[in-house]
Amino acid sequence: MREIQFREALREAMNEEMRRDKRVFLMGEEVAEYNGAYKVSQGMLDEFGPDRVLDTPISELGFGGIAVGAATNGVRPIVEFMTFNFSLVAIDTIINAAAKIYSMSGGQFNVPIVFRGPTGNAGQLGAQHSQNFENWFANTPGLKVVVPSNPYDAKGLLKASIRDDDPVIFMESELMYGDKGPVPEEEYLIPLGVADIKRAGTDVTIVSFGKIMKVALAAAQELEKDGISAEVIDLRTVRPIDYATVVESVRKTNRLVVVEEAWPLSSIATEITYHVQKHAFDYLDAPVQRVNSLDVPLPYAPTLIQAILPNVEKTIKAVKAVMYKD
């Protein structure tokens, strides 16, 4: 199977859906003439023209509102935020309009829209450009929240998101756009709300999503050297969450570690922990451990960034804690 970059997988998904459905269009800062800030939309203006690939002003609230209005009138926008940190400018449009229109209209209006762009830490970008909002958006009824970890999942999940009749928050990572992975040439979709067991194991369950899956998988590989068999689950979507796959795994391994980049309070890790203790408490041989970023804004210094973010060493330590090992 061919291998393509994460950005290429996203581009293929958008291209295929725009060829398939003329109601789909892309809008955002620098998506057209500049080919996208991260070159995700490279070449799309040439193929689809300025009516379907639209450069916007630096006004997330403005173009976010335009997209929501367009979606309620029968088209299917894809809105690219240069970073989800900038989505805070448009959060009223996302939370109080996109997420609520279907319910408040009594089902008369769907809002088929995808808000996509990078989330989380991307190196030395400072505290205002390094935040994770997956748990913020996942807290909102009416939204679906997707966080892919590899090119294959990114393409299949984005195609499914574009076809979905609900608003979808599709969160990527600047540190993953150049990642390569196998992606079939034939069409495929991955349904939202279905987790994937990326590595089978018997001793402990590690749950993660997005780019932190790299940490989880690397930790599992190191743990294997110590005779610990880790099952690694990629949630892929954090609203809806595939609780059943996690619970089934914990009932087999009897131990759980959740690894997530977001701050610990009200995190996805907290939600997973609550659900597992409610539905698999009698199967747990140790308290659930979670590995989050420290509860501080991300600094600029690379040494401090490394100290604050989840990493392989912290994940191994958490696993050994639930295995009762030093």
Image (spheres, rainbow, N blue to C red):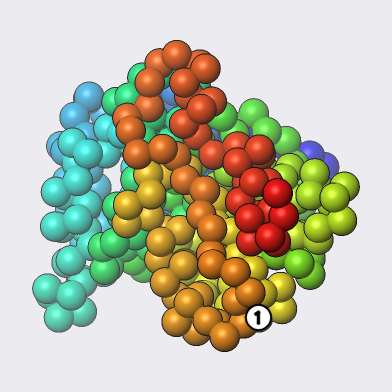
Residue 298 visible in this rendered orientation of the protein? yes
| Residue 312, percent from left and from top | 66, 39
Q: Residue at x 73, y 42 (%)?
A: 218
Kindly identify the amino acid type of the residue bearing the numbered disc 1: Arg
Name the image quarter holding residue 278: bottom left
Q: Residue at x 40, y 66 (%)?
A: 271
| Residue 100, percent from left and from top | 18, 66
Q: Residue at x 33, y 33 (%)?
A: 296
Q: Is residue 185 above or below residue 273?
A: above
Q: Residue at x 63, y 74 (%)?
A: 285
Residue 164 visible in this rendered orientation of the protein? no
| Residue 240, percent from left and from top | 43, 69
Front in this rendered view, residue 132 or 86: 132
Q: Is residue 278 above or below residue 235?
A: below
Front in this rendered view, residue 240 or 214: 214
Front in this rendered view, residue 223 or 57: 223
Query: Tag 1: Cα neighbours inside 10 Å, few (<14), some, or many (≥20)?
Result: some
| Residue 145, percent from left and from top | 41, 58
Residue tagged 1: 251
